[in-house]
Image (tube, rainbow, N blue to C red):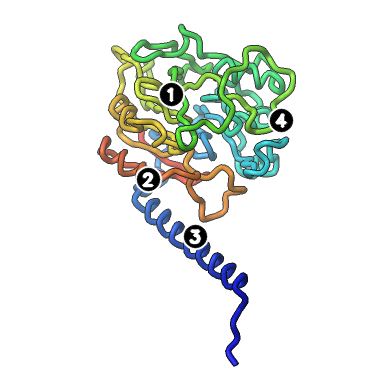
């Protein structure tokens, strides 16, 4: 007698096998795409002539040169899809594990106020970066006022502070004047299918409570940044272009700078997530910035809990396409660090 499984079992088994096959093919495709990126440079023998760029996850970075340090907003809590419309809090266990101590950091840059950039900051301000000031748009300052003292918040999106197109903005310095940055007025790409899935709009007044659901953290004003490590006489020893959201052509660009300010950009950190949701991106940034090196940031799936391998790219984003389009517009190395990895690049 021949045993024949019920049709419903057969369909379920076929579905499971198809899912496993799809996952295997996707994993192979992702591994092949990641392999296209350049190998990270080794740790230098003499750290005094190098800038260390440690990727903290999402849009978060820690940039250091000797005792000089500046950071961009880390995010590691990664609530799942199911938590986006419910109340979600920072995962303090993950923050304690993956965000390094930053007592020496005076400045943290916040590109916009979505939860995947701002939600972890109140806990980080208390426990990881207790001396830092947080610079961002007015919405960032107004939302974080519910949990961070006003004296530690700086809104830098005003017309005289942020660069707009080719017009330069204002330079902001650390206390020792060894680091400076300029905010650049930018825009935020749609998340998927040309639609923004997280709240847009601004917050005009200081808040007394933080948003509960992650999707209720409004975008606010979006900024990119130039970050300079300075040498004697204020010369630019190392320049970083940084964005935490892909931008429309003509926005988030480096303005026309003159004299010593017109230094070459050493590295451009570009947002990989949703990069193809904006026409002409990242080509318009690379044409404007012309960096020596390119780094893909904010590329990993921030709905995935933890930092376990294999780390997969954010939904709907092709690493292969990102690499191909960057390579068509830039001849320098292209790096894709995993959270926790450090890139070492020499100063001039």
Instruction: Kindly identify which residue carries mark 3.
Output: 23
User: Mark 4 or mark 2: which comes first in sequence?
Assistant: 2
- Camera-nearest label, 2 or 3: 3
Image location of residue 83, percent across then percent down: 68, 41
Distance between mark 4 and mark 1 Cα atoms = 32 Å
Instruction: Kindly identify which residue carries mark 2.
Output: 41
- If the image is split into quadrants, where does the C terminus sit? top left
User: Mark 1 or mark 2: which comes first in sequence?
Assistant: 2
Q: Residue at left 41%, top 22%? A: 226
Answer yes or no: do the residues labelled 3 and 1 have beta carbons within 8 Å? Answer: no
Q: Residue at left 58%, top 47%? A: 304
Answer yes or no: do the residues labelled 2 and 3 have beta carbons within 8 Å? Answer: no
Task: Tell me, yes or no, if residue 52 can be seen here.
Answer: no
User: Mark 3 or mark 4: which comes first in sequence?
Assistant: 3
Disc number at residue 188?
none
Give SS at disc 2.
Answer: loop
Distance between mark 3 and mark 4 Cα atoms = 33 Å
Looking at the image, residue 21 sits to the left or right of residue 2; the answer is: left
Mark 1 packing: few (<14 Cα in 10 Å), some, or many (20+)?
Answer: many
Disc number at residue 212?
4
User: Mark 2 or mark 3: which comes first in sequence?
Assistant: 3
Indicate the quadrant where residue 297 lies.
top left
């Amino acid at each position: 007698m021949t045993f024949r499984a019920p049709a419903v079992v057969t369909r379920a088994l076929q579905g499971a096998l198809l899912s496993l096959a799809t996952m295997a093919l996707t994993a192979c495709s992702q591994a092949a795409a990641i392999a296209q990126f350049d190998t990270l440079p080794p740790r230098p023998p003499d750290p005094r002539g190098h800038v260390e760029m440690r990727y903290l996850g999402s849009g978060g970075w820690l940039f250091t040169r000797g005792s000089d340090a500046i950071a961009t907003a880390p995010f590691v809590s990664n609530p799942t899809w199911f938590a986006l419309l419910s109340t979600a809090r920072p995962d303090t266990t993950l923050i304690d594990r993956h965000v390094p101590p930053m007592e020496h950091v005076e400045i943290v840059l916040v590109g916009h106020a979505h939860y995947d950039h701002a939600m972890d900051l109140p806990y980080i301000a208390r426990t990881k970066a207790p001396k830092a000031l947080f610079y961002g748009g007015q919405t960032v300052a107004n939302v974080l006022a519910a949990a961070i003292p006003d004296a530690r918040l700086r809104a830098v999106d005003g017309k005289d502070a942020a660069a707009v197109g080719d017009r330069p903005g204002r330079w902001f310095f650390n206390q020792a004047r060894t680091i400076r940055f300029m905010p650049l007025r930018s825009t935020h790409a749609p998340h998927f299918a040309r639609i923004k899935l997280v709240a847009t709009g601004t917050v005009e007044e200081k808040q007394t409570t933080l948003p509960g659901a992650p999707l209720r953290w409004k975008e606010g004003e979006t900024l990119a940044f130039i970050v300079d490590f300075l040498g004697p006489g204020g010369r630019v020893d190392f320049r970083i272009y940084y964005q935490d959201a892909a931008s429309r052509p003509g926005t988030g660009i480096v303005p026309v700078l003159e004299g010593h300010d017109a230094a070459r950009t050493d590295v451009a950190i570009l947002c990989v997530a949703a990069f193809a949701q904006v026409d002409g991106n990242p080509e318009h940034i690379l044409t404007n910035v012309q960096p020596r090196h390119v780094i893909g940031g904010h590329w990993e799936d921030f709905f995935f809990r933890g930092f376990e391998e294999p780390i997969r790219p954010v939904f709907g984003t092709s690493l292969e396409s990102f690499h191909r389009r960057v390579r068509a517009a830039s001849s320098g190395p292209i790096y894709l660090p995993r959270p926790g990895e450090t890139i070492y690049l020499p100063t001039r």
